[in-house]
Amino acid sequence: MIKLEHVHKTFANKPAVTDVSFEVLPGTLLVLLGTSGSGKTTTLRMINRLIEPSSGQITVNGKLIQDQSAEDLRRGIGYVLQNNGLFPHYTVAENIAVVPRLLQWDEARIRERTVTLMKKLHLPPEEYSEVYPAQLSGGQQQRVGLARALAADPPVLLMDEPFGALDPVTRASVRKEFMALDELENKTIIMVTHDVQEAFEMGTRIGLMDEGRLQQTGAPEELLFAPANNFVANFFRDQRLSLELKTLTLNDIKPYLPPAAGSDNYQPHVLPGTTSCWDALEQTMHTEGVLSVDFRTEVFTMDSRSLMTALQVYKQTAANGSTTKSF
Amino acid sequence: MEAQQSLFDFIQQQSGKLLEQTLQHIGLTFISLLIAVLIGVPLGILITRKKVLAGPILGLAGILQTIPSIALLGFMIPLLGIGAQPAIVALFLYALLPIIRNTYTGIKEVDPTVTDAAIGMGMSRRQLLYKIQLPLAMPVMLAGIRTATVINVGVATLAAYIAAGGLGEFIFGGIALNNTNMILAGAIPAALLAILFDGLLSLLQRMQLRKARKAVYALPVAIILLSSFYLLPSAYGTKLVAGFTPEFMGRKDGNLGLKKVYGLNIRTVVISDMIMYKAAYEKKLDVISGSSTDGRVKAFDLVVLADDKHIFPPYYAAPIVRNATLEKYPELTPALNKLSGTINDSIMTELNYRVDYLKQDPARVAKDFLVAKKLWLPARNGTKGTIRIGSKIFGDGYILANMYKMLIDGYTDLQAVTKTGLGGTKICFDALLNNQIDMYPEYSGTGLLVILAAGQQTVDSLIADRQKVYDYVSNAFMQRYQVRWLPPIGFNNTYALMMRRQQAAALHIKSISELKEYLTVKGKE
């Protein structure tokens, strides 16, 4: 759906992006993760031609991006910015309708689409249509920004730190809302962030960038348990345990549970196997360290200690390159 | 209270003129503003895109802004002459900087995230400009237009100096005539206009963005409408155009007399006497209110029209001397009288021409003249006493004072010193009365009207006869001030209407009556 091949960008002889190649499959979300100045935003902005690459090829939907006018390309790509970039002199409804107007939809269709989106994003139209962005809270503004990007139902979405300007609490709730949105199903998305937790929570795949280079692209577990180089390994060091716990589900570690773990101490609240280890541990706080898990084939009861032991074994096995999970 | 009452009277009397001037003033302000917006806004947009041009263009507009307005108008005269064109261009140049700068700043200050979003949404450059940048820059741009408008209302008063009309006519006329009511009749409406337009534009600026959209469309229409005001007063008029100084406009022995006594009805513009002669020479004006012995009459080949109904009082120059000095040094009178009757109008014009226009030293011009008339004798360097000669700051005075010094030095054993540049009539005469100077050249008309401030009846009975005026002031000065008028030098430095020699000859106009005749018969077509 989106494909970059050997893309380079230099600004005044200083390389900003060096030899970046990746492909984002339809309906998946790639997170470009990195610190400030790592080249992730530059990479993103080359895709909708806000920045022209110095060399290399970018195709969106199988078409080279240079082969169409920049305006047409951009109208087919949803774009969400960090500071929302809403037009202060447009009402909420007008902001959302920007791209459909550029595409010259008829007014009835625009109105219908705007109302639909506002409802889905919990902005009741009767209350918010005629309101200006300055009158909205930060979270509401970001939702309008998202609605605007989705208005013309583009197959591709580019998001530059979409939750970056929000406080941590709002951020978590807007993110959750975002992930639950049916509008995003089947969309191909590239999202830039410097927030590791966010990257792991949202990314189908993560591309970790540093100094203009893509250090590793892969599923979150891949980056955690099979880092391509020291940079990748060190990058997650501070949050490693919590990331591991959040990334792995009980299903993932099931093969490594010590056999003695099973007991008859069933809990009334049974967790599904798709629960992350993090959430499972959280659950043990209320159950004196005991968990019942439904692994489909059997309901298994274990304690927090055996969970941690299984995780340890999983990591050792992964490091030897022979886990059962295929990345 | 009385002053207010008479201001009100003045405004009532002059309401037609006041309305005309106000319309012209509004017109001048908004024509130039319109041009400044039409040129300044695109330039401001251009320099947001071509950043290398931003420095030079803003710098140039800034320099234009620093030129004193009267000087800028002066620069315009050689390029565009006088009248509306140079005034509009000068006002336009003044209005340019705030408009360019605020357009530039306004667009620059649009949140980059917003423009980034607009481009990212797929807007073209044109859409970006019209949908995003201009609407968001509008309050700042309006602030620029507002500044420019207020500047223009103020500077437009100076347009009266170059015959472009406006409320400056009353203001400068009032200053020249020391007529406070006239100054206020011009200054108060000018101030009110500035406040009014400032208020209206600030209202527009503060309006809600949505409503402002409509108002902003109405703005150009309003500006064009207001611009057209300028054309209203000049839609009627005569074939010939007269340029009168602000002072002449308001004097009984000036334009008012021309209307009353001659019934002269000519399209009149107000103009500074600094540029009036040249404007007549350059055919921007046909008739001007000059001073009959001014050197520029010769320099620009103008001809004085005869005042056949005697509305201009005689201004014959003669030395006036403290009687005490004359009695103390009897030899002084014959020495001073040597000059009597030797200088007629055209000689004085010639002498002034050499000083004012050819920039020759007044002492040299004085000596050349005396030598040519065989009146010059080498200085005796006498030590009998000192005679202090004063003069006003005008050309006539310098030359005459120098001549008198040479005559006293050559014909008597007295030593003469000159104290030239004593400002106007009041300063010279006070110096004489207070024994700071012994003598200075004065004009009979000035003696009658300014120093003696004779009543209207007296003036009316005397004014047509030069001899009667001279006799009257001569007697009155002796009785009242112990100051003696010696015999006149010969020339009459009075107001005069003048035209280009060629045109006057072609139209067969030699007197003011003939000018009136010409205008009545052929002027109104």
Image (tube, coloured by chain):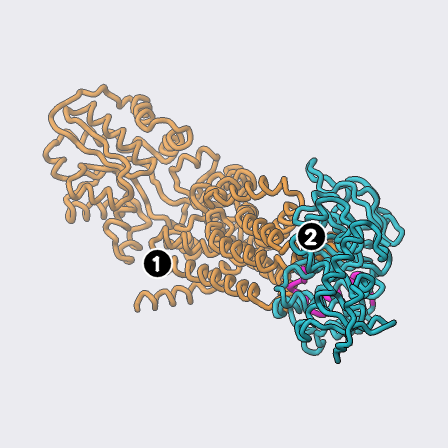
Residue B507 at least partly seen: no
Query: Is label 2 in a helix, a strand or a loop?
Result: loop
- The boundaries of the magenta stretch are A84-105
- Disc 1 packing (10 Å; few <14; some 14–19; many ≥20): some
Q: How many residues crowd mark 2 within 10 Å: few (<14), some (14–19), many (20+)?
A: some
Q: Which chain is cyan?
A: A
Chain B drawing hue: orange
Question: Which residue occupies the extreme right position in the image?
Answer: A62
Observer-side mark, 1 or 2, equals: 2
Residue A100 is inside the magenta segment = yes
Residue at the image point whose x is 22% and y is 34% from the top: B389
Label disc, if present, on residue A236 of the rendered structure: 2
For residue A170, what is the image quadrant?
bottom right
Q: Is residue A112 left or right of residue B334?
A: right
Image disc number at residue A179: none
Question: In percent of the image, x 84 and y 44: which residue is there?
Answer: A5
- State the residue position of label 1: B180
